[in-house]
Every structure is written in C-alpha cells, then in structure tokens.
C-alpha cells in the first residue's frame, strides 16, 4: 500500500517539475540583450514574443515580420536587432544597434575563412537609412551572413485582424566581400578601422520590403560562400602555412629604429616558421595595456584586419602574459602568439638530434606550463600551424601534474647531457687542444664558415636558427702563404701577417645562433649547448655585415654572453658577408672596430688573415 503511494509520487513528480524547468529554460533562452533601461514589462513581453516567430529559412525576411519589428521599434523609439539562424529561427533579440547587441566572439560559431557564421541580423534604424561604420564593423567582426537594414518611416498603422503595416517601406542588405575585392591583399601598414571596414563590406541599394521578401536568401548566401571558398582555396594553394597578421607595439622605451628592426625580424621569423605575413598593424603607446597590450580600439582594428585579410593567426612582436593571450584571443577570435612562441616553433621544426629535440621540448613545456588554463578556448588548436608543433598539442590537454613530471624528467636528461658534454670537453682539454667557439647572431654565416675552414658538412641555409646542435671540428692553423690572394690585398693585413709562424691545431665549434631578447625558456633549455661557448678558450664572434642592423646584433650577442654564468674567453670580432655589404657599412665597421677581421665565408675572401688572427687569438688565450 505504502509502496504504491511512493510509486505514485514518482509518477506525479515530473508533472510538477517539468513545466518548472521549461520555464527556467525559456527564461534563459529568451533573454533580451542590450539596453533595457526604461522598458515596461509588457514591452519586454512583446520583445520576448519575437523568439516565438520565425521566417522561412530561404527568405531574408517576411513583410509581416519586418513590419512587426519596425512597429515595436517605433513604439520604443529605439533601434532593435533580431538575429536568425539559417533555418529562419530567432536566436537573439537585442535593444540597440548591431554594434551594441553583437554576439560575443566566444559564442559565435567559427567555420574558417571560407564560410560565414550562419547568422544574419535584421536591424531597425529610427534615424539613418544606411548602415554606418559601427553596424558594418559588427557585420565584419561576427562574419554575419548578412545585415538587413530596416530604416523606419516614423509612422504606421494597425490592420484589422492584428497585422501592422507602413512602419518600414524598403530595406538595404549589407554583406562581407571576399578578400580579392580588397585593394592589394597584402596590406603592410596601419589602416583606420573605418577604412578597413568599408573595404571589406558592401551595402546594396534599397529595395522595397516586399521585393526583398521574394529574394532567395539561401541562394544569396551559398553564392557568397562559394566565392569565399574559391578565393580561400586559391590562397591555400599559394600559401600552405598560417596566414599571419603581425602586430607591433611601439612603447616609449623602444627606439623607433629598433622597433622597426624587431618587426622586420618577426616577419622573418614567421616566414622561417612556415607562415606568410598578410599584414602589419602598428600602435604607439606609452606602455602596454595590462589586459590587451594594445588599446581597445586597436584590438578591434586587429580583429577586423584579421577577418578581412583571412588571417588565422596574430603574432605580437613582444612577449605576452597568459592572461593577455586569453583576452586577445577572446576579442580577436583567432589564435594569438607572441615572439617567443614563434621562435619555439622554429626550434621545434628544426630539432633533428635527440639532444636538440630534448632541449626544445623542455623549452616548449616550460613556456606552455603557465599558459595551460583557458588557452585556445576561442578556437581549436588542432590542425597544426605556428605554436602547435612539437610536443604542444596532446600535452596541452593533459594535466598539469603530468607535464610537471615530464619537465622534471627532461630536466634530468638535460643534466645528463650536460655531464656528457663536460666529459667530452675534459677529454679535449686533456689532449691540450684549445677550443674556439663560433658565436654570433642567427644567420650570420657561422656554419658556412665552419664548413669552409674545416670541410665540415654542417647544414647551412638562409634561415634563422638553421643550427641547433653544436658541431666541433679540428682545424690546423699553419704559417701563412707568403703571397696573399687578390682578396687579401683589399683588406690590408696586420703586421703579424707577413711574419712566418709555426702551425697549431685547434678545435672549432659551431653553435646555435643568438637573437635579441632570447626567450628565457630557450636560454635555460640550451644551457648544455651554450656551455660549449662558456668553456671555450676563445670566441670567434661572427657578424653579418650585410644586415642593416649589424651594430644591434653585436650588442645583442654581447648582452647574451654577459648573462652566461661563466665569463667566456677573449673574443675576435669577424665581419662576414663583405661581398654583400655596402662600402659605408665596411667603413663604419673598420672605424668602430679597428681590430676586426673582414671576410666572406661564402666567397672565401679574407680567410688567410682570419686563420692568422685565430692563431694569435689562441696564443693569447692560452697565455703563450
Ligand atoms: N652573401 C653571402 N652570404 C653568405 C656568406 N656566408 C654565409 N652566407 C649565407 O648566409 C646564410 C646563413 O648561413 P649559415 O652558415 O647557415 O648561418 P648561421 O650563422 O650558421 O645561421 P644559424 O645556424 O641559422 O644561426 C646562408 O644562406 C649562407 O649561404 C657570405 O660570406 N656572403
Ligand atoms: Mg648555423
């Protein structure tokens, strides 16, 4: 009997609770967005009722819906926006302009550059018959299917039977333009938001509302998407990697030349990482914005540029905090990386040897560790690209603890590697062969020089960070040939050159290239490799004299050497690529560094003088 009653309760309970939950659900779904100040309850109810209406999926609108919306808007004396999905269902109602009621980036579906977001907005406008920059910005930022603009007449009438009419007569449709319509796909330079938005959107002439209701919306949108897809696939054939928008922030502590150099270097880094730069946005600020690095307006401009140029990655020329990356990704809607991540990605692609891979993995994990939470919420990191290669992807999803354990293990392995290298070095010292490490900015020609001096076969290429692992080769320095080759006569030899000297064997080590503001995780992870430098008896500091920023490169190398725990031995400054350097650069270098040696490793110029100077350097370093 009692059991029967209990059963009965279980049977009846859902009838009480289901409607209750349905009401909560409806309340949650039927939210009215935007500025609700001063709205009466019955007006709110009227707006909520819009959620129960729908238009046929293949129509822009129906005259009835447009008139109903216009009538409410006229009564409220406020603009209204209604958002539809492709099935014609109302998914959002807002009081205000398209800008004020737009869907936050995280709530928007993202289908990639070849598709639109699947949502269209119908907006009433009490005052303007044409969408302005604000509305078009919203259209571009959300990648809306279309914006249907309904200018209000200011009056109207109620029909018998409940219908309304006369509140709106004509409508305008605005939509996004495929990238080829932009003047010059590669936009390098700053553009204002207004300019880029008018370039990436178009507003069609007004049509009577009845005529618009006759037009096939699905035909329109599939045609537009087909055009986007054609162009995007064309772009993808051209460039397989990431399409990257660079952002440079010139804070007051940055010298303008150094800033431009840094930006050019980031361009090169992105290129080396396999991405292609599609545009550059610059901003001058006294200091970085704590939340978003650049100002609010600039974030919007970046988002718009990324949209209109079809960029899928935004790279900043400075390091970003984990919170800044999260905020930027949320606003911009694409992945955001900083300079360190681009460099780490290059290292991940380049690492060949076990030791190199180990060090890169350690650096990547140390970098990613504080950035694990909330990263990549706005977009999938699947599918590869800058910042996703190497150990990143799968481990990102694993727990922090697992990663910490892995870091500890890698650290132990790096320590073992360090001990192994120590033993090798001790053996060399045991044989009393002095070591000279070739150091220098990345791409200076270090590996090329080792190859021409010792017939080594180290990989040398016009790429940043072509070398990650050190290579050591023996070089026998003998007395100079008495007749100097033609090239030598261009660069007068030092007085010692003519003196016959006896031969001597040295070990020459090619090392990983340096870069300004070397990311600390890399410095840490490459400790074992960099010790080759600190333990060398002397350094051959190679400088690419054909690079316009060579003085800055010298300073950057000195700065990194200064941070090393053991002070490296004496240094010989060698200027490379004189075949490609300007005569002014050669003159300036000679004036500033009178003891420098001038060579072209590529054209084998000045090598005899270099050998001689190396011998002197080694003698000086070993106290002979
Ligand atoms: N014009 C000219 N190019 C040179 C010379 N020496 C090297 N290069 C070129 O410079 C580029 C970089 O050479 P690498 O030897 O790989 O430079 P690296 O310093 O080892 O570079 P990383 O290992 O990437 O740090 C290659 O394309 C070389 O062909 C030179 O004397 N003149
Ligand atoms: Mg190299």
Image: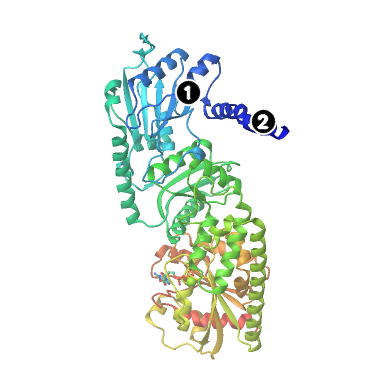
Asked whether the beta carbons under mark 1 and mark 2 sit within 8 Å of each other, the answer is no
Q: Is residue 115 above or below residue 436?
A: above
Q: Give the secondary structure at mark 1.
A: loop
- The residue that label 1 is drawn on is 96
Q: Quadrant of the C terminus?
A: bottom right
- Residue located farthest toward the bottom when viewing the structure as drawn: 502
Q: Is residue 192 visible?
A: no
Q: Quarter-wise, where is residue 615 in the image?
A: bottom right
Q: Is residue 213 visible?
A: yes
Image mark for residue 555: none
Q: Is residue 306 above or below residue 509?
A: above
Closer to the camera in the image, 528 or 35: 35
- The residue that label 2 is drawn on is 9
Q: Is residue 278 above or below residue 181?
A: below
Mark 1 or 2: the one toward you? 2
Closer to the camera in the image, 229 or 449: 229
Q: Quadrant of ligand 1?
A: bottom left
The picture places residue 130, in percent across and down from the top left corner, at 35, 24
Q: Quarter-wise, where is residue 418 in the image?
A: bottom right
The picture places residue 315, in percent across and down from the top left corner, at 49, 51
Q: Residues within 10 Å of mark 1 (few under 14, many from 20)?
A: many
Left or right, residue 70 beside residue 615: left
Left or right, residue 144 beside residue 338: left
Question: Rounded to the nearest whole Å, what is the CA distance between mark 1 and mark 2?
Answer: 48 Å
Q: Quadrant of the N terminus?
A: top right
Number of numbered discs overlaid on the protein picture: 2
């Amino acid at each position: 009997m009692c059991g029967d009653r209990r059963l009965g309760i279980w049977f009846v309970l859902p009838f009480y609770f289901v409607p209750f939950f349905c009401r909560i659900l409806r309340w949650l779904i039927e939210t009215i967005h935007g500025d609700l100040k001063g709205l009466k309850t019955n007006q709110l109810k009227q707006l909520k009722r819009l959620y129960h209406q729908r238009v046929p999926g293949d129509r822009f609108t129906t005259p009835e819906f447009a008139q109903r919306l216009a009538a409410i808007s006229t009564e409220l004396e406020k603009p209204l926006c209604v958002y539809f999905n492709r099935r014609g269902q109302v998914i959002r109602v807002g009081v205000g302009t398209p800008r004020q009621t737009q869907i936050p980036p995280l709530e928007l579906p993202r289908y990639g550059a070849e598709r639109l977001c699947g949502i269209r907005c119908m907006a009433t406008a009490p005052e303007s018959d044409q969408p302005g920059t604000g509305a078009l910005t919203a259209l571009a930022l959300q990648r809306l299917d279309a914006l249907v603009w309904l200018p209000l007449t200011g009056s109207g009438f109620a029909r018998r039977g409940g219908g309304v009419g006369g509140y709106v007569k004509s409508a305008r449709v605005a939509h996004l333009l495929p990238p080829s319509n932009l003047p010059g796909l590669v936009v390098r330079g700053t553009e204002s938001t207004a300019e880029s938005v008018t370039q990436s959107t178009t507003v069609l002439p007004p049509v009577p509302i009845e005529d618009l209701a006759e037009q096939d919306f699905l035909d329109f949108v599939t045609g537009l998407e087909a055009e986007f897809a054609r162009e995007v696939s064309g772009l993808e054939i051209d460039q397989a990697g990431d399409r990257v928008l660079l952002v440079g922030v010139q804070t007051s502590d940055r010298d303008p030349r150094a800033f431009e150099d840094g930006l050019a270097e980031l361009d090169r880094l992105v290129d080396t990482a396999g991405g292609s730069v599609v545009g550059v946005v610059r901003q001058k600020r006294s200091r970085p914005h704590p939340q978003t690095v650049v100002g609010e307006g600039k974030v919007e401009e970046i988002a718009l540029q990324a949209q209109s140029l079809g960029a899928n990655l935004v790279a900043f020329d400075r390091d970003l905090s984990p919170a800044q990356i999260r905020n930027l990704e949320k606003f911009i809607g694409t992945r955001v990386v900083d300079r360190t991540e681009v460099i780490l990605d290059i290292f991940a692609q380049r690492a060949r040897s076990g030791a190199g891979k180990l060090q890169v993995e350690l650096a990547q994990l140390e970098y990613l560790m504080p950035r694990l939470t909330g990263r990549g919420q706005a977009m999938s990191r699947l599918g590869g690209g800058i910042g996703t290669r190497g150990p990143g992807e799968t481990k990102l999803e694993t727990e922090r603890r697992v990663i910490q354990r892995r870091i500890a293990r890698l650290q132990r392995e790096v320590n073992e590697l360090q001990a192994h290298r120590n033993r090798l070095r001790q053996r060399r010292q045991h044989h009393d062969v002095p070591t000279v490490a070739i150091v220098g900015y990345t791409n200076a020609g270090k590996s090329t020089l080792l190859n021409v001096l010792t017939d080594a076969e180290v990989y040398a290429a016009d790429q940043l960070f072509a070398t990650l692992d050190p290579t050591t080769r023996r070089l026998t320095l003998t007395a100079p040939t008495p007749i100097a080759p033609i090239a030598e006569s261009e660069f007068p030899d030092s007085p010692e050159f003519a003196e016959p000297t006896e031969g001597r064997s040295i070990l020459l080590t090619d090392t990983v290239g340096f870069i300004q503001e070397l990311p600390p995780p890399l410095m840490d992870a490459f400790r074992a490799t960099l010790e080759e430098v600190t333990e060398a008896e002397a350094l051959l500091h190679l400088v690419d004299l054909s690079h316009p920023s060579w003085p800055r490169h010298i300073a950057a190398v000195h700065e990194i050497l200064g941070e090393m725990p053991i002070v490296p031995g004496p240094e010989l400054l060698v200027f490379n690529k004189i075949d490609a350097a300007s005569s002014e650069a050669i003159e300036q270098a000679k004036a500033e560094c009178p003891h420098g040696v001038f060579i072209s490793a590529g054209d084998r110029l000045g090598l005899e003088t270099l050998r001689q100077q190396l011998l002197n350097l080694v003698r000086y370093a070993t106290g002979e």
